[in-house]
Amino acid sequence: MWKYRAIYIAALLSAGAVYIATNERHLFMFLIVLAVLPVISFAMLFLSTGKIQIGCELQEACIVYQRIGMNIKMIYQGVFPIGRIRLTAQYHNLMFQKEEEQTIFLENGNAKELSYEMPYVSRDCGRIEMQFSKVAAYDIMGLFSRKIPLIQTYDFTIYPEVINMGVRLGNLPTAKNLGDHYDQNRKGQDVTEVFGIRDYQDGDSPRSIHWKLSSKWDQLVVREFSHPSNYDTLVLYDPTFPEKKVKYHEVVNSVLGVTASISKSLMSQNLAHHVGGVSRAKFTDSRVEDKPTYMQALANMMSTVLPDVNENVLDEFLKRDVGKAFTKIVLVTSNFDEYNVRRLADLVDLTVVLISADGEDRVEKEMAYDVITRTVESLKTKTWILEI
């Protein structure tokens, strides 16, 4: 805008200087027109801004580093011509507590309805809240602008990349009490006890299909297995990692991606489990039994603020005594806390998956737990079978 004002003032002064030097009448008329034009241009802008409507359509989700498409639609119901529109979008990542801004200019061209694409790529996963923080319309001369109020907030989710891996249970979860106790109100992973029968859905394991009933009813049906109420498995994630360190974003997103991958593999094997984490001295977890609950667990994880870099996740977890509710825990972390790992291993069957910024992949078998180290680079290139 200041550029156009400078050009206008330079033109006005030049025309005035030429008129003073020549005293020609047509130059005087040109000066009058040049002086009146900004007034007319501002008046048209003033009368037109209330006739501008801007909306946005966008995808609900995508994967980290993927481009999410946002379609900006502008409807202009005014009569007078106006200039371009400046639109600034502000993105707030709920998980990383980070703010980003993106500004584009919409060239109106006096069309009544136009669509624009505003691409956005995030290097971090998490729930994103987006709103247009600054929207302004310019006059046709580019000298003035008026704000357009837009208060609507949009949200979408950037999911971590689920890596190519499988999970194999070396030790099945064991009951805390003798005997089999089944929860009558929810399904689970015990294939020896059937909870119920339902129609087949996309994502169901072929192994759960009841072939005899499917052929009899002429449609695919699956068995839902019972849940033993006296044992459970937890995938516990701890993404604390110093932000100033190299590969900060890669490590944190890899911890979240490996957590999602382990949960997906367990879900595909009909192994009900929990996915949880500690943040800001609060433990939150989600139960995963099928694809809808898996997607809900991911959504909950993406909306949870990351732990503070000085927060000791394992220590907070042990303080809350929630570890006693589980018999098997898979800890996915970027920060190996040997003291609290040993404390946790005294309570449950523990496997530690350590995500490293560099170094080599390795497996260390301790007496009470295993430590499986994977680098962020190897996660991108290698197929991985995790035994827990």
Image (spheres, rainbow, N blue to C red):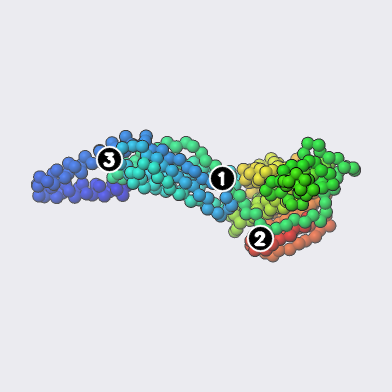
Identify residue type, mark 1: Glu
Between the residue at mark 3 and the residue at mark 2, the CA separation in whole angstroms equals 58 Å
Quarter of the C terminus within the rendering: bottom right
Residue visible at 22% across and 49% down in the picture: 11
Mark 1, Cα crowd under 10 Å, few <14 / some 14-19 / many 20+, is few
Mark 3, Cα crowd under 10 Å, few <14 / some 14-19 / many 20+, is many
Residue 273, given in percent of the width and then of the height, sits at 75, 46
Secondary structure of the residue carrying numbered label 3: helix
For marks 3 and 2, the one nearer the N-term is 3
In the image, farthest residue toward the right: 178
Which label lies toward us, 1 or 3? 1
In this picture, residue 180 sits left or right of residue 28: right
Secondary structure of the residue carrying numbered label 1: loop
For marks 1 and 3, the one nearer the N-term is 3
Task: Please tell me which residue lies in front, 222 or 129.
Answer: 222
Q: Is residue 339 visible?
A: no
Identify residue type, mark 3: Ser
Q: Is residue 300 visible?
A: yes
Asked which quadrant contains residue 170, the reply is bottom right
* Residue hosting label 3: 41
In this picture, residue 266 sits left or right of residue 123: right
Residue visible at 32% across and 34% down in the picture: 47
* Residue hosting label 1: 60
In this picture, residue 325 sits left or right of residue 42: right
In this picture, residue 268 sits left or right of residue 192: left
Secondary structure of the residue carrying numbered label 2: helix
Identify residue type, mark 2: Leu
- In the rendering, which numbered label is found on residue 379? 2
